[in-house]
């Protein structure tokens, strides 16, 4: 693996952010709007004093974590779609670039976005609602990293489907995560789901992260089983999604569809 | 002479349809070779297999004496490609595009290399321009600049003068001949402009229905088919169903 090739694609994407207001808005606007809506709602719920439940902490923590997952998945898919929209995939893959280097570059683009969103939301939630994300302590970093990796795995899956079926499948880049949300126990515990769906929820790394986050807020103690659950589930997802992307790429090369992707 | 490209019994089928059918040819080092044939003959499929963008059904491709399955990075590091049908990102400036592709190829002294090529292709005036704002002629020159960034030993050019006006097409041909002469680059070239092919190609390879129909120097083929120019040779081959 060569760093100069990974760096080339990373910088190529940063060039785009440098001058594109809509791209910056995508990082700032939606997360901030969500934070405001959910923040005011949680303050309202807290004022109603519903059964000692700390709405600001639980809901804002969930919103911010969900945005981390969302940014991660979206940035991987958008970085890939940029090259399809610009009909640049062919130019890229006639260079010595390896698929693994292409993956790492999308991972880094996602990481840059994650850091930006993280800083903005952490500062705003503290200033407006007095919510300190760092009250999660040590758990914060591994939980966020797990969400980031799961988002990346989902992004790879969406990209593999786009490779296979063309840009008519690009709706997946925006809509796929919505499918995962109800089963990830983002705003409610897994126990709130119907019995039948609970095993499904535990197949998702995100469920362990959100359960773990609530556990830290509720008890103040770090939940190692939740972290390990997320790590193991992520290992499976990442292995399968990377394998799937390689398979789809080989299919596209076999069928001569790389140039026709638009 | 050394063959930079060796193709042996190359086959590519899409389902039951053969796009390239038992094709064998070689491209000699330091030459400009035209890969010719009517629409649907299999030229683009062949070029894409030479670039490892399409996996052949069977057959052997050796470039610089190596095969993709064992030396992909080494091969792609020493060749480049340009086509008016493949764009560079329009949402980057010309300079950003050159920097990006220079980094992808791991070009040493990238800024100096860009500087030299920018003068060679006379594109300095629009280095800061967004790529989507370039005219067709400017885009062609940018594509060729990108194609020379890694100082390639082999250039694959897919209809480099298509959609250019006669003046710009003539300048582009002159540039290609200059590149070949000054840098000793081997060029494999597809075009439908037979006058152009006759002017710049040392050898031509005719393919039809994915099969090799004939090959040789333009003069040899004109004499062999008893015509006055390569255009008539093309028509004679394309209209002969056997």
Image: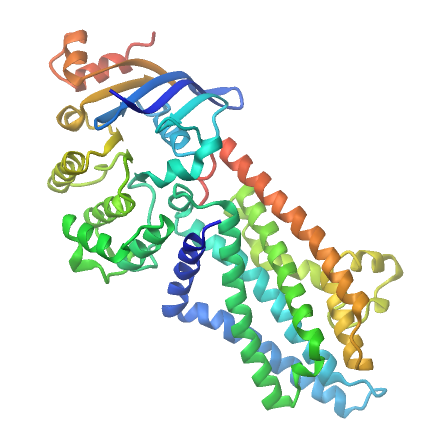
Front-lying residue, B137 or B215 = B215
Front-lying residue, B167 or B26 = B26
Q: Residue B147, how many percent across, how many down?
A: 28, 43
The image shows residue B41, relative to residue B177, as above or below, that is: above
The image shows residue A199, relative to residue B205, as above or below, that is: below
- Can I make out residue A183 in this image? no
| Figure quadrant of residue A176 | bottom right
Residue shown at 24%/61% (left/top)? B129
Left or right of residue A30, residue B7 in this image: left
Q: Residue B170, how many percent across, how many down?
A: 12, 37
The colour mode here is rainbow
Front-lying residue, A103 or A69 = A103
Quadrant holding the N terminus of chain B: top left
Q: Residue B184, how many percent across, how many down?
A: 19, 34
Residue shown at 14%/52% (left/top)? B119
Q: Residue A114, how many percent across, how many down?
A: 55, 69
The image shows residue B46, relative to residue A22, as above or below, that is: above
Residue shown at 53%/48% (left/top)? A100
Left or right of residue A42, residue A76 in this image: left
Residue shown at 36%/50% (left/top)? B106
- Can I make out residue B223 in this image? yes
């Amino acid at each position: 693996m060569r760093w100069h090739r990974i760096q080339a694609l990373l910088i190529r994407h940063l060039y785009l952010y440098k001058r594109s207001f809509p791209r910056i808005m995508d990082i700032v606007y939606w997360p901030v709007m969500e934070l405001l809506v959910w923040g005011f709602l949680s303050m309202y719920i807290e004022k109603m004093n519903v059964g000692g439940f700390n709405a600001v902490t639980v809901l804002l923590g969930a919103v911010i974590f969900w945005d981390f997952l969302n940014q991660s998945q979206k940035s991987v898919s958008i970085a890939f779609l940029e090259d399809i929209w610009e009909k640049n995939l062919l130019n890229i893959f006639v260079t010595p670039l390896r698929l693994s280097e292409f993956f790492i570059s999308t991972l880094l683009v996602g990481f840059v976005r994650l850091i930006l969103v993280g800083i903005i939301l952490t500062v705003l939630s503290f200033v407006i609602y007095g919510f300190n994300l760092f009250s999660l302590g040590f758990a914060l970093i591994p939980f966020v990293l797990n969400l980031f990796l799961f988002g990346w795995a989902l992004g790879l899956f969406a990209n593999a489907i786009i490779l296979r079926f063309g840009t008519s499948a690009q709706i997946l880049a925006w809509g796929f995560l919505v499918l995962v949300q109800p089963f990830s126990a983002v705003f409610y515990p897994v126990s709130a789901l119907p019995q039948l769906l609970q095993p499904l929820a535990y197949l998702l790394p995100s469920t362990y992260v959100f359960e773990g986050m609530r556990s830290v807020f509720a008890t103040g103690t770090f939940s190692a089983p939740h972290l390990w659950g997320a790590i193991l589930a992520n290992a499976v997802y990442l292995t399968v999604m990377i394998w799937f992307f390689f398979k789809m790429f080989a299919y596209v090369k076999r069928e001569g569809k790389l140039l026709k992707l638009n | 002479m050394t063959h930079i490209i060796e193709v042996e019994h190359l086959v590519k089928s899409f389902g039951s349809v053969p796009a390239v059918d038992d094709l064998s040819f070689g491209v000699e080092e330091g030459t400009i070779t035209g890969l010719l044939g009517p629409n649907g003959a299999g030229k683009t499929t062949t070029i894409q297999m030479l670039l490892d963008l399409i996996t052949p059904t069977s057959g052997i491709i050796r470039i610089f004496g190596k095969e993709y399955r064992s030396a992909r990075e080494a091969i792609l590091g020493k060749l480049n490609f340009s086509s008016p049908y493949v764009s560079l990102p329009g949402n980057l400036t010309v300079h950003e595009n050159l920097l990006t592709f220079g980094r992808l190829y791991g070009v040493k002294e990238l800024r100096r290399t860009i500087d030299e090529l920018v003068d060679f292709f006379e594109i300095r005036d629009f280095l800061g321009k967004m790529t989507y704002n370039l005219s067709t002629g400017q885009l062609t020159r940018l594509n060729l600049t990108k194609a020379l960034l890694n100082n390639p030993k082999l250039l694959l050019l897919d209809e480099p003068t298509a959609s250019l006006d006669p003046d710009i097409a003539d300048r582009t041909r002159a540039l290609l001949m200059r590149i070949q002469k000054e840098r000793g680059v081997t060029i494999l070239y597809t075009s439908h402009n037979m006058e152009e092919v006759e002017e710049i190609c040392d050898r031509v390879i005719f393919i039809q229905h994915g099969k090799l129909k004939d090959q040789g120097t333009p003069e040899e083929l004109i004499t062999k088919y008893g015509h006055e120019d390569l255009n008539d040779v093309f028509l004679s081959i394309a209209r002969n169903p056997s």
